[in-house]
Amino acid sequence: MIRLGSFVALTIFVSATIVFAQEDQPNLSLDRLVAAYPKALAGHDADVLHWRDGTVMPLSDGTAHKTFDERLRHASIADQLRIPYARGPLLKPPAIDADAGRFRNRAFFTKMYGDCTKGELAPHLVTITWLPKTWGKPIRITSVNQVDQRLLLVSAEIDALPAKIKHAAYPISGTYNCRAIAVTGQPSPHGYGIAIDLNTAISDYWYWRPHSGTLRYRNRMPAEIVAIFEKHGLIWGGKWYHFDTMHFEYRPELLTP
């Protein structure tokens, strides 16, 4: 039999542990962010992100209780780490608005990769051959954070897959493209040179389907391809409630164990 005093002490301990875990989660996510970009980021404290060149960026924009749409259009650095990304096999459709990685702080990504509308991407764009044994077409991608090298590794591993699987990875529908996202008007990750869209013929995108109510999830992208991208630091849009199964983008901070 557990005595009342012991029960109360245990309850307080468990409650304190839960509270500590909730309070520590933002710090853990920020630690992962800094660790994911060691050449660019120096650290963080409770309020700001420190860049190695001395730049300081606020983690929050001071706006509490944002709606999902507000975070999509005006994300803070804290917002972009708000939703955890589920690495590994997708066992069930994503929960409503569970779009890990779709919140992007414009200032953060522009500083990291440049503003394509001002020609700042050009010095860092390189051309690589996608699936040289199978498709062999050139694509343009940024060399910042060695994204080009990571995609070369992805390409080589997909090239070694059986034909019926790797066909989902070509012809691709886009890499670098200086454009805005149609739904929000915010800069596309393609405009930073960190994203690739695969074969549209076997891809599914929430906006192409009826979306006046609850979305009905759909996916035909092979799990083997998703696993290869995740292994090299790219998240998959098929793990979003607002699914975009052709889309992959370099976001290693969301994949760090």
Image (cartoon, rainbow, N blue to C red):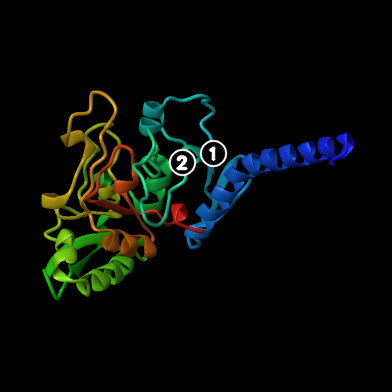
Taking the image as shown, residue 210 lies to the left or right of residue 92, namely: left
Question: Horizontally, is 84 left or right of 241 in the view?
Answer: right
Q: Nearer the viewer, mark 1 or mark 2?
A: 2
Asked if residue 233 is positioned above or below residue 79 in the image, the reply reads below
Residue designated by label 1:
58
As drawn, is 68 to the left or to the right of 56?
A: left
In depth, the one of 115 and 129 nearer the eye is 129
Q: Residue at x 39, y 45 (%)?
A: 101
Residue 15, image x, y percentages: 72, 37
Q: Are marks 1 and 2 in contact (CB under 8 Å)?
A: no
Q: Position of residue 75 (x, y in %)?
A: 42, 35
Between residue 223 and residue 24, name the one nearer to us: 223
Question: Above or below — where is 100 with respect to 42?
Answer: above
Q: Is residue 42 above or below residue 84?
A: below
Quarter of the image holding residue 210?
top left
- Packing grade of label 1 (10 A; few <14, some 14-19, many >=20) is some
Q: Residue at x 46, y 54 (%)?
A: 253
Assign the N terminus to one quadrant of the image.
top right
Residue drawn at 71 percent across, 43 percent down: 17
Query: What distance separates the C-alpha of mark 1 from that of mark 2?
Result: 19 Å
Residue type, mark 1 in image: Pro
Callout 1: SS: strand
The residue under the point 17% across, 53% down is: 174
The tally of labels here is 2
The quarter holding residue 158 reads: bottom left
Q: Quadrant of residue 157?
A: bottom left
